[in-house]
Image (cartoon, grey):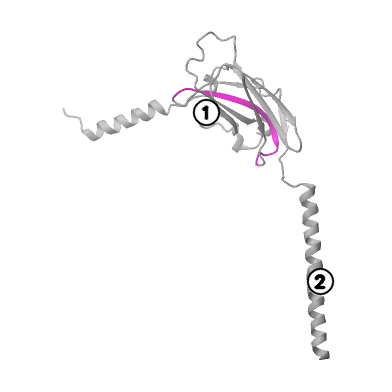
Amino acid sequence: MEVPAGFLLVSLLLFSFAATGYGITFSSLPRSLVVTTSPTQGQGEEQITVTWALNQTFPAGTDSAYRTVKVKLCYAPISQKDRSWRKTEDEMKKDKTCQHKIVSRPYSASNNSFSWTIMRDIPSATYFVRAYVFNAEDHEVAFGQNTNAERATNLFEVQAITGRHASLDIASVCFSAFSIVALAGFFYMEKSKGKASQQK
């Protein structure tokens, strides 16, 4: 019995999709990275310094498939409550815990550090930092985070930066006052010209 070519093509495509799009779960990832953070308050700008390295308690060769590390800012449980758009899911494709990218770098077992200035569009919330490790196929294969499994320790708060500064407020007041004075002067000059025309 001859199998139609179209059927073979569809079967091949489905097999390829299943092979490349399998569902990776967070619970299946080993915690093989040690991640630490030191949030600091700078000159009007909040910064976070993140360091990460391979956990030396893991056996040699654990990181043989590691290619890339992507560090992300993640919502703590207290900032996920009643917010479905930040919900934690075990399936990585559905998980919304870590929505804010900090940095992506080629994998190195040690001496990794990055200082990140918190962007203006980061919402006010309580956060932690997590680093995902990816293989050559860009699939998550491991992780590390600066908090415990319950995501209850070493948390920090971020206050959204509005972008308003005292100097901007002062400048806007000055421009407003100048506009009023200029408008009043314009009307005064027009009125004076009108009176002069009538006298002639």
| Mark positioned earlier in the residue sequence (2 or 1) | 1
Find out whether residue 83 is within the magenta segment: no
Find out whether residue 125 is within the magenta segment: yes
Q: Farthest residue toward the left?
A: 1
Query: 7 left or right of 38?
Result: left
Q: What element carries label 1?
A: loop
Q: Which amino acid does label 1 sit on?
A: Met
The residue stretch that appears in magenta: 121-136
Q: Which residue is at 81% across, 71% downward?
A: 184
Name the residue carrying label 1: 92
Which disc number belongs to residue 184?
2
Q: Farthest residue toward the bottom?
A: 200
Q: Nearer the viewer, mark 2 or mark 1?
A: 2
Query: 141 left or right of 174?
Result: left
Q: Which residue is at 78% across, 61% downward?
A: 176
Query: So how many labels did they put on this image?
Result: 2
Which quarter of the picture shows residue 58?
top right
Q: Which of 184 and 91 is in front in this view?
A: 184
Residue 52 in the image, given as x and y percentages of width and height: 62, 20
Q: How crowded is mark 2: few (under 14 residues within 10 Å), some or many (20 or more)?
A: few
Query: 101 left or right of 21?
Result: right
Q: Is residue 30 visible?
A: yes
Q: Nearer the viewer, residue 154 or 165?
A: 165
